[in-house]
Image: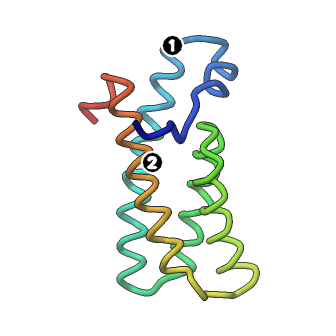
Amino acid sequence: MTPKIYSIKKLNEIGQGDPAFVQDMLISFLGNVNDAIKKINHFRSDDNWNGIAEVAHKLASNFAYLESKNLQAIASDIEKSVLIEKNLSGIADKTDKLCNDTILLVEQLKNDFDFLSTN
């Protein structure tokens, strides 16, 4: 069994235990990450690393709400490497890891929350 790469503890705290809030946030998250993966793949085919960095920045905050620290760190590292350090070394591999691990996160969420399996 694969360990969980997320937690909804923070969402429960923010929503004060309201399951409808958590559900809405998870549905929103799923839509955001699906769009982000599409954008990353599009930017990747164009070697648009700045575009990828911008998407990674947006993803990092989404991952923070799900306490997915590893994904948040990868996204932040991509953003920092591209926009601040101007270092593209290994960015393609980091981008692949970000996408693959995000897909794993989405799969875990869909397995754990029936209402997400239709999205």
Q: Amino acid at mark 2?
A: Asn
Q: Secondary structure at mark 1?
A: helix
Its colouring scheme is rainbow
* Residue most extreme to the front: 1
Residue 34 lies, in percent from the top left, at: 37, 51
Q: Amino acid at mark 1?
A: Pro
Q: Is 58 situated above or below 91?
A: above
Report the side of 53 relative to 20 (left or right): right
Give the spatial CA distance, label 1 vs label 2.
20 Å
Q: Quadrant of the C terminus?
A: top left
Which disc number belongs to residue 4? none
Snapshot quadrant of residue 8: top right
* Residue most extreme to the right: 84
Q: Is 78 situated above or below 2?
A: below
Snapshot quadrant of residue 13: top right
Nearer-N-terminus badge (1/2): 1
Q: Tell whether label 2 touches label 1 (CB within 8 Å).
A: no
Please report the residue visible at 56 percent of the width from the left and 83 percent of the height from the top.
Answer: 90
**Residue identified by numbered label 1:** 19
Q: Is 7 situated above or below 63?
A: above
Q: Secondary structure at mark 2?
A: helix
Please report the residue visible at 44 percent of the width from the left and 70 percent of the height from the top.
Answer: 96
Please report the residue visible at 53 percent of the width from the left and 41 percent of the height from the top.
Answer: 5
**Residue identified by numbered label 2:** 32
Please rate how many residues cluster around mark 1, counting C-alpha atoms within 10 Å: few if below 14, some from 14 to 19, many from 20: few
Report the side of 113 relative to 56 (left or right): left
